[in-house]
Amino acid sequence: DARVTQTPRHKVTEMGQEVTMRCQPILGHNTVFWYRQTMMQGLELLAYFRNRAPLDDSGMPKDRFSAEMPDATLATLKIQPSEPRDSAVYFCASRQGDYGYTFGSGTRLTVV
Amino acid sequence: SQQGEEDPQALSIQEGENATMNCSYKTSINNLQWYRQNSGRGLVHLILIRSNEREKHSGRLRVTLDTSKKSSSLLITASRAADTASYFCATDFNDYKLSFGAGTTVTVRA
């Protein structure tokens, strides 16, 4: 089965450090999403791309978060500087057309 | 909010029983989807129902959609321990991004 691959699976970092999360979407899927999941807020859409172009990043704190898709096989989500409130599980998902999403296994981020 | 809202928040049933959970939403949709999330894992797509469909089946899953009431239900028949998970409905409002509800946590007791 085709998979969305996320790295790293776990990340513990100190407050103020830069964090980069990576995602390899399914080949041929033209829409890529970044979601964040916390107990309090549930699943929040941070950003998404179609054909590598950013369409909506209104869910991201712009001052510290950035999302890019340098090529069709890689999407990145960067936090600089990280804060304890950024601790969450970050999911990447990809989609072709209006079919269901395929999610990655997530990156569990802990900022101490 | 455009998010779907699931009901109940939590459900505990005996193995072999059926589990039903509901989802309500607020505005017109293109389609509605159901996902399952096992503890510590990513979400897995279960079923998609389009706005012009009323019912869909997939194995032991049955989904209904009532656009006049802006609601959907997910029925899991003959539940198994492996069905223990959180279930989320997600609504697509024609812009290809999904809004997720808070989920229903289902526990199937052996």
Image (spheres, rainbow, N blue to C red):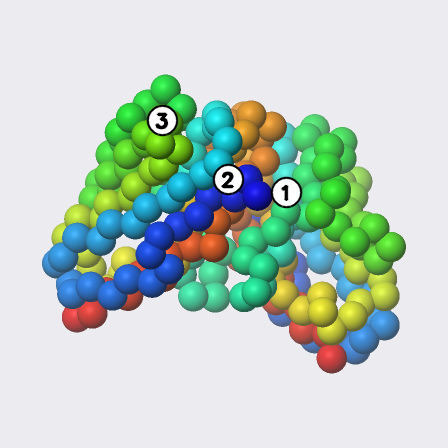
Instruction: Please give left or right for residue A74 compared with residue A94 in the image.
Output: right
Quadrant housing the N terminus of chain B: top right
Where does label 1 land, which residue?
Answer: A33
Report x, y in % for residue B108. Answer: 23, 65
Label 3 crowd (10 A; few <14 / some 14-19 / many >=20): few
What residue is drawn where x is 74% and y is 79%? A112
Real-space CA distance between mark 2 and mark 3, rounded to the nearest whole angstrom: 26 Å
Q: Depth check: give the residue in front, A85 or B57.
A: A85
Task: Give residue B63's quadrant in the image.
Answer: top left
What residue is drawn where x is 58% and y is 59%? A41
The amino acid type of the residue labelled 3 equals Ser
Instruction: Please give left or right for residue B15 compared with residue A2 in the image.
Output: left
The amino acid type of the residue labelled 2 equals Tyr
Instruction: Please give left or right for residue B73 compared with residue B14 in the image.
Output: right
Where does label 2 land, which residue?
Answer: A101
In the displayed structure, B25 sits above or below A76; it is above
Label 2 crowd (10 A; few <14 / some 14-19 / many >=20): many
Q: Which tag is nearer the camera, tag 2 or tag 3? A: 3
Q: Chain of mark 3?
A: B
Q: Chain of mark 2?
A: A
What's the mark number on residue A7?
A: none
What residue is drawn where x is 72% and y is 37%? A56
Report x, y in % for residue B11. Answer: 28, 62
Q: Depth check: give the residue in front, A25 or B48.
A: B48
Where does label 3 land, which residue?
Answer: B68
Real-space CA distance between mark 1 and mark 2, rounded to the nearest whole angstrom: 9 Å
Which of the two discs, 1 and 2, labels the residue nearer the N terminus? 1
Q: Depth check: give the residue in front, B99 or B60.
A: B99
The amino acid type of the residue labelled 1 equals Phe
Real-space CA distance between mark 3 and mark 1, rounded to the nearest whole angstrom: 30 Å
